[in-house]
Image (cartoon, rainbow, N blue to C red):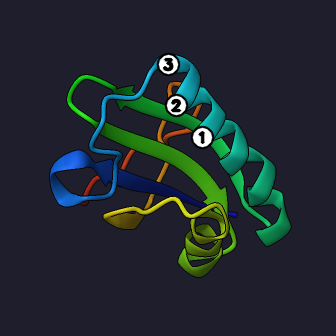
Amino acid sequence: MKWFIDTHDKAKGSFPKEQLTEAQFFAQFDALEEAAPNFGVVAHAAHVNLKEGKAFCFMCGPDEEAVRKAHEVIHLPFDSITEVKRVTGADLRHPAPRPNP
């Protein structure tokens, strides 16, 4: 599985112009979570600022096209979908090899 962040921004037309309530936003994210598995995608989380009309969704799936389809089937526009690498404190990090003097 690959990791993706997709963006939604009222200033770019990909977030509703009227200010959403938390309940309205949750309903929209619930719809995305429900549709996503049909495309092999999981909607893990969203970071949102309702006042500014911006959201960043954290998802995983086989490819960008699958993430795009999950959004399109529920008529949820987006500005971009970017493949990212997930790094957390639980990741195993190996030190870079040091050059021989």
Residue 75, percent from left and from top: 56, 64
Q: Amino acid at mark 3?
A: Glu
Q: Is residue 43 placed above or below 49 in the rendered structure?
A: below
Q: Could you tell me how far apart the alpha carbons at marks 2 and 1 are, in whole angstroms?
A: 5 Å
- How far from the left and from the top, in percent, is residue 30? 70, 37
Tags 3 and 2 in contact by the CB under 8 Å rule?
Answer: yes
Residue 80 locus on image (x, y percent): 34, 66
Badge 2: how crowded within 10 Å, few (<14), some, or many (20+)? some
In the picture as drawn, the residue positioned furthest to the top comes out as 22
Relative image position of residue 81 (x, y in whole percent): 41, 66
Q: Residue at x 78, y 71 (%)?
A: 39
Name the residue beneath numbered marker 1.
Answer: 28
Compared with 9, 92 (above or below) is above
Label 2, on which residue?
25
Amino acid found under the numbered disc labelled 1: Gln
Report the residue at 60% width, 28% height from top: 26
Snapshot quadrant of residue 36: bottom right
Q: Amino acid at mark 2?
A: Phe
Mark 2 in CB contact with mark 1 (< 8 angstroms): yes
Q: Is residue 10 left or right of residue 40?
A: left
What label does residue 22 carry, if any? Answer: 3
Quarter where residue 18 is shown: top left
Residue 101 visible in rendering: no
Mark 3 or mark 1, which has the lower sequence index?
3
